[in-house]
Structures are given as C-alpha cells and as structure tokens.
Amino acid sequence: MIISERKPLDEIRKIVEPLQRFFLIGCGACATVCKSGGEEEVFQLQEWLIDQGKEVTGSVVIDEACHLPRTGRDLRHHKSAVQEADALLVLACGGGVQSVSSQTEKMVIGGLNSVFLGNVKRFGQYEEKCSLCGECILNETAGICPVTTCAKGLLNGPCGGMEDGRCEIDSELDCAWHLIYERLKQQNRPGVFARRVPAKAWSKSCKPGRHQLKNTGR
C-alpha cells in the first residue's frame, strides 16, 4: 500500500490562491486506508476551500486512482463538473495524480505527499518493508528484506555496530540481520548465509518501471 499524507494547508493555499473553481478527486484504495484521500478527507477539503472563498464544482472518489482506464471513465462521467473547474485537486498518491493529469488538459494539483510503500501494523500505523528494488532475495532471508529493514541496506550480514540485536543507527530498531539469522536458525536452514550475495543490480529498478504480464500459455 502506498502511504501518503496531506500536504500542509499553507502549501495548498499558495497553489490554489489564483484559482477559483475546483473539482476534487479522492482515491478509494490506499489514500482511503491512510485517511488522507477518502470521502471524509475530500469533504473536509471541500469545506476548507469554501472557507477560503473558493467554489467546488463536484467531486469523485475513484476506486483506484492509479488505474488509468478507470480514472478516465470516472472523469468522463463528471465531464460537466470537470469542465467548469479551473483545476482538479487530487487527494491520491503521485501515481493517482499522474493518472488524472494524463486524462485531462486541465491543471491538476496534488494534495498529498507520497511517503513510502508500507505495511499496516495497526490502524493509523504503517511500516516500510519493501523498497521495490526489483531483485528480491526474501526466499533466502526468511521473508525479511535487508535492503529496506537494514538501516544500511547491507546484503551480507550485520555490520560491526550491531549490539544485543539492536541497530547502531537507531537503538529502538531491531537489527534486520539479527532477525534474519534467528528466523533462519528457527527454520533450521542456512538461507542467504550459504552464499555471498553479489552487489545489487540497481539497473533492475531503473525508472520509469514497466511491467507486462507474460503469456502463460493458458
């Protein structure tokens, strides 16, 4: 899930100041779960804009704002309200903002900052577990990603600063490699410790990323 948070209102105020009419867009997926761009947050933004003397021509919460065809469909369903607006204000991650901007010639304003790809720890608390590096070794590290959960991104075991299973960068953090070792030990397998991991091929995470499903023969 993409973790996002609303931009400071002062920042949004400066962007919307020269404009008058806005169409608001939220995301029913990640931004809704993060409480940054669901129906409630879209309504709150609408009320704030009205307090600023602005007009809201309409709004929609797209099921998944990063879904290009779905975004285009929903904007067509609100064509009149979109056309009446000076700009579209989007409460979604950067992917959602770009989906919207690809479907309209109107000015598109992003109201959120995308923070990281996160796992839900509990409601309102999220942790980064994956860096989307394109070269997973999770099968060898007992399902713990050292690229992300190790503060130094080390690929071949803990650094010399680990002490009592804690990270030297932040003593509140467990050392990722200590966790990997203990879990592999519990599973009675050597895992990644049976080899030396070569330097990461960062070319696999070159931007922009593209992926297409392969023909499975079905």
Image (cartoon, rainbow, N blue to C red):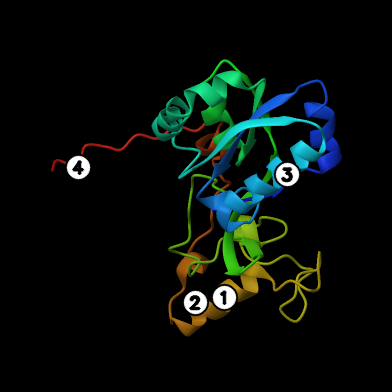
Give the total of numbered labels: 4
Lower sequence index among marks 3 and 4:
3
Mark 4 to mark 1 CA distance (whole Å): 36 Å
Residue visible at 68% across and 67% down in the picture: 158
**First of labels 1, 3 by sequence position:** 3
Question: Which x, y percent locates residue 109?
Answer: 68, 29
Judging from the image, what secondary structure is the residue with disc 4 in?
A: loop
Circle 3 crowding by C-alpha within 10 Å: few under 14, some 14–19, many from 20:
some
Task: Identify the disc placed on residue 181.
Answer: 1
Q: Give percent across and percent down for residue 3.
A: 62, 52
Query: Which is closer to the viewer, label 4 or label 1?
Result: 4
Q: In the image, what residue type sits under mark 1? A: Tyr
Identity of the residue drawn at 43% across and 77% down: 189
- Residue occupying image coordinates x 72% and y 56%: 152
For marks 2 and 4, give the one nearer the viewer.
Answer: 4
Mark 3 and mark 4: span between their CA atoms? 50 Å
Identify residue for label 2.
Answer: 184
Q: Considering only order in the chain, which callout, 1 or 4, is on the residue closer to the N terminus?
A: 1
| Tag 2 secondary structure | helix
Q: CA distance from mark 1 to mark 2?
A: 5 Å
As drawn, the label of residue 216 is 4
Q: Earlier in the sequence, mark 2 or mark 4?
A: 2
Q: Which residue is mark 3?
A: 47
Q: What amino acid does circle 2 point to?
A: Leu
Q: Tell me which amino acid carries mark 3.
A: Glu
Circles 3 and 4 in contact, beta carbons < 8 Å: no
In 3D space, how far apart are the residues under numbered discs 1 and 3 (Cα atoms)?
Answer: 52 Å
Between 60 and 84, the residue placed more toward the observer is 84
* Quadrant including the C terminus: top left
Label 1 Cα neighbours within 10 Å, binned few <14 / some 14-19 / many ≥20: many
SS class, disc 1 = helix
Mark 1 and mark 3 residues within 8 Å of each other at the beta carbon = no
